[in-house]
Image (spheres, rainbow, N blue to C red):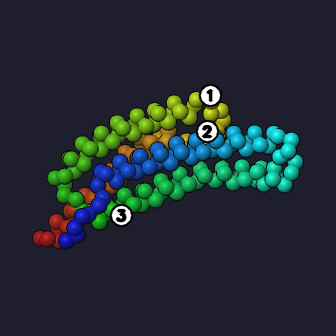
Amino acid sequence: MVINKKGSVRDIALFMVVIFSIGLVSFLLMFVYNSTSNLMLESPEFNDTMAGDVMLEHQETMNGIDYFSLAIFIGFLFAVIITSYLVGGSPVFAIIYILFFVVLGVVSGILESIWGEVSQMVVFGTTINNLPITDFLLNNLTLLVIVVGFVGLIVMYIRGERLEWEKT
């Protein structure tokens, strides 16, 4: 018997909050970096120097921050599957899981709406064009939370049935 098992609807909530937070932070970092580097590149002391060339190359590198959000999403997907398998829940608790899951769906819809409002603000300009993967993940956050949650529920239920079968 494993004590202090992890793997439940809390993992889905953590998934939702972390994906949203990383997306928002990377969006803001990209905006600040692009704004400051563009100001530096416009100054005559900085432009057409070796430092200016490095700054231009680094702007292209910063676009890779978008893949960080994708890596975190894939990591959480695997983590939910693995922890759900290790827990092996009882079908009786599936109803409680679904009830909390509905609440998480509503909260993810709110976070998705917040992302839509923030990312389309005029003050941020075209920063969102540098983060297409993050934009896709956060514009479809509710769908992703539902899919990951149901995958976790199915894996947990299958494992629970197998444990019940082995007891008999």
Q: Residues under labels 2 and 1: Cα distance?
A: 11 Å
Of 17 and 70, the residue lying toward us: 17
Residue depicted at 37% across the width and 58% down the height: 80
Q: Answer with mark 3 or mark 2, whichever residue precedes in sequence.
A: 3
Residue 111 in the image: above or below residue 91: above
Residue 158 seen in this snapshot: no
**According to the image, label 1 marks what residue?**
122
Residue 142, image quadrant: top left
Q: Amino acid at mark 1?
A: Val
How packed mark 3 is, by other alpha carbons closer than 10 Å (few <14, some 14-19, many 20 or more), is: some
Can residue 31 be seen from the camera position used here?
A: yes
Picture coordinates of residue 166, whole percent (x, y): 17, 71
Judged from the image, the secondary structure of the residue bearing numbered disc 3 is: helix
Secondary element type, mark 1: helix
Residue type for callout 2: Ile
The residue labelled by disc 2 is 128
Q: Residue flagged by tag 3: what amino acid is it?
A: Ile
Within 10 Å of disc 1 (Cα), the crowding (few <14, some 14-19, many 20+) is few
Q: Which mark sits nearer the N-terminus, 1 or 3?
A: 3
